[in-house]
Each structure stands twice: as C-alpha cells, then as structure tokens.
C-alpha cells in the first residue's frame, strides 16, 4: 500500500542577515543567549528544522502579544525539558520558491527579567510594527477588570452564604450542609501543553531560567 | 563635577538614535521605560525582499495543525 507523506518532516529556515543582526548580534558576544543561537545556526542552515521541534504560538498571549499562525522552538533545540531551554526562536511560515519554509522573526529569552522584551514581544513588534502591544495591554486590562468583577460577585455570594448560614444556626462563614453553595467556580479546562513545557510550579524552583537569569 | 541630565521627550514606541545606533523606547514593566536595540525590519519588508507569500490557512493547518502550543506566547 502506497503511503504518501502528509507533510515534510523538516522545513528549511531562512534567516535574513538584518534580522540576525537585530536579534542575535545585539547580544554580547559571550552571552549565553548569543552562544546558544550561534550554535543552533549551523544546524539550521545544514539540517533544516524538524517539525517535532516546533510548537504553535498563541493567537493571543497573556502578555498582550498576538502571534497567531507563527511557530516557535525552544533553544537549545533538543528534547530536553523546557526549563533548561531558556531561549526561543519565533518563525513566520511562508511559501517560497522551493515550497514551505520558515522565516526567522525573533530570538531572545522566553522569560526575561523586567525591562527586557521577551522573544514573543519582539516577534509581535516585528509582525505588527509598533504600538500594538499597548493596545493589547488595554484588552488585558479589561480582562483584569472582568476578573475583579468576578471577585466582587464571589465576595457578595460568600457574604450571602454567611447570612444564610447565620440564620440557619450554622457557624458563621459556612454554608448550610444540605444546600448547594451559592457561588461555584467553573472548573477550568487544562491547557494543552507541549511535551517538556514548564508548569507554573516549575517556575518556583530556584534553578528555573526565569529566576536564574534575573540575577 | 555635577552631571547634568539630558532630558528626553520620548514615550514608549519611539525610536531614538544615539551615536548612530537606533534604540526602541520600551516599557520596563515597572512604570518606567528602557532602551533596547531597535527592531526595524518588519515582516512585510522581509516578504517583499524574498518574494515569498504567507501560507494559506489550509496550508498552515496541514503543516502545523497538529503541533502543540504551550500557552506561553
């Protein structure tokens, strides 16, 4: 039975000298970020990149970035856990003369210290040009405001619960046993995580890159 | 000798040039601003230089539809 390959296992990567200059050569020559990028560059030029090393960017990130239809890889590019791969390449998929390929858009730290843009913020700026993140931050502000409203509602619900509990003779602050709680949180669907990606718990570890590179 | 500060009338998103190098004025996420080497080349310019086109939605889904995402950015 003939089985046609549904997609190529590797994709070529195009790297504009201007983008490489702005993304990698801005870094100090001996910095871990620049050394890691330079090490991967040879492999990308020679062997292209395996689709298994890629993951999709978020259409709307928590930091206000909008990177829908972009893909990324952690650096160093290997199968290690995300917590030991603190950098990232963000690529823009396109169709060139030879077929599908990836154009390098941004490189940098995934979770930099304050005052430095993350690789996602850099990709956003290159994709959308300036000012857009600030507008997105406005939407994030709206989300925060909605969260605050939800908190207010929950506070009102618990106050009402206390009143009901007080009237039924139960200790203050507890709802009557046979009655359903007035306010119930909707369980969140767990996010689909990439293999080896880090969880919020990982970031509490002292050796997590976000903490390590803050010093 | 006292140092006199040069006052800059810039805001986040501006580009400043210092000794021939361009910098973006970006937020330091603590209420202030900081300078970073500027991003000047946009995707549109890159695409125009190479003569490439964006993948269609179908092409993107075919190639990358099964890839995971990590909720990070």
Image (spheres, coloured by chain):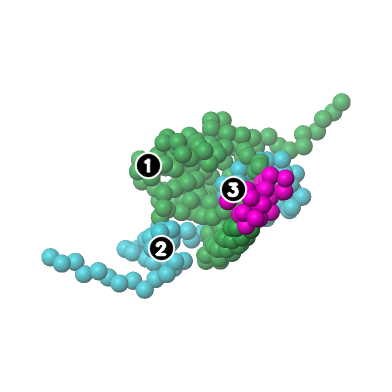
Chain colours: A green, B cyan
Please say if the residues under marks 3 and 2 sit with CB atoms less than 8 Å apart: no
In 3D space, how far apart are the residues under numbered discs 3 and 2 (Cα atoms)? 45 Å
Q: Kindly state the secondary structure of the residue where label 2 is placed.
A: loop
Furthest residue in direction front, as rendered: A169
Q: Are marks 1 and 2 on the same chain?
A: no
Place of residue A61 in the rendered image (x, y in percent of width and height, measured from the top left): 59, 53
Disc 3: which residue = A171
Q: CA distance from mark 1 to mark 3?
A: 60 Å
Foreground residue among A110 and A146 = A146
Residue at disc 3, secondary structure: loop
N-terminal-most mark, 1 or 3: 1
Residue A190 x %, y %: 66, 42
Name above or below for residue A138 compared with residue A42.
below
Number of marks in the image? 3
Q: Is A43 included in the stretch rendered in magenta?
A: no
Please state the chain letter of the residue tagged with numbered disc 3 in the rendered image. Answer: A
Q: Position of residue A193 (x, y in %)?
A: 63, 39
Q: Quadrant of the N terminus of chain A?
A: top right
Contact check, label 1 and label 3, Cβ < 8 Å: no
Residue that carries the numbered disc 1 in the rendered image: A31
Q: For residue A79, which numbered disc appears in the image?
A: none
Residue bearing the label numbered 2:
B31
In front of the other: A136 or A173: A173
Seen at 30% across and 72% down, the residue is B7
Q: For the point 72% across and 48% down, which residue is it?
A: A179
Q: Quadrant of residue A52?
A: top right
Q: Residues within 10 Å of mark 3 (few under 14, many from 20)?
A: few
* Left or right of residue A209, residue A128 in this image: right
Relative to A54, say whether B42 is above or below: below
Q: Is residue A151 left or right of residue A180?
A: left
Residues in magenta, as a range: A161-189
């Amino acid at each position: 039975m003939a089985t046609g390959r549904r997609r190529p296992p590797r994709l070529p990567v195009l790297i504009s000298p201007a983008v490489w200059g702005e993304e990698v050569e801005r870094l100090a020559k001996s910095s871990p970020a620049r050394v890691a990028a330079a090490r991967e560059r040879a492999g990308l030029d020679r062997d292209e990149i395996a689709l298994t090393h890629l993951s999709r960017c978020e259409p709307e990130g928590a930091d206000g970035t909008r990177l829908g239809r972009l893909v990324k890889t952690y650096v160093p590019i290997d199968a290690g856990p995300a917590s030991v791969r603190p950098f990232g390449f963000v690529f823009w998929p396109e169709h060139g003369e030879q077929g599908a390929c990836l154009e390098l858009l941004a490189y940098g730290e995934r979770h930099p210290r304050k005052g430095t843009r993350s690789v996602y913020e850099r990709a956003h700026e290159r994709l959308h040009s300036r000012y857009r993140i600030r507008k997105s931050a406005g939407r994030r502000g709206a989300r925060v405001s909605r969260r605050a409203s939800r908190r207010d509602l929950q506070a009102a619900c618990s106050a009402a619960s206390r009143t009901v509990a007080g009237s039924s003779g139960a200790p203050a602050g507890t709802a009557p046993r046979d009655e359903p709680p007035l306010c119930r949180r909707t369980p969140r669907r767990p996010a689909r995580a990439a293999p080896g990606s880090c969880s919020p718990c990982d970031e509490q570890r002292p050796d997590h890159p976000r903490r390590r590179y803050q010093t | 000798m006292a140092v006199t500060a040069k006052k800059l009338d810039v805001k986040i998103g501006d580009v400043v040039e210092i000794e021939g190098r361009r910098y973006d004025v970006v937020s330091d996420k603590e209420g202030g601003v900081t300078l970073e080497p500027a991003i000047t080349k946009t995707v549109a310019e890159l695409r125009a230089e190479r003569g490439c086109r964006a993948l269609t939605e179908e092409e993107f889904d075919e190639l990358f539809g099964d890839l995971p995402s990590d909720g990070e950015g």
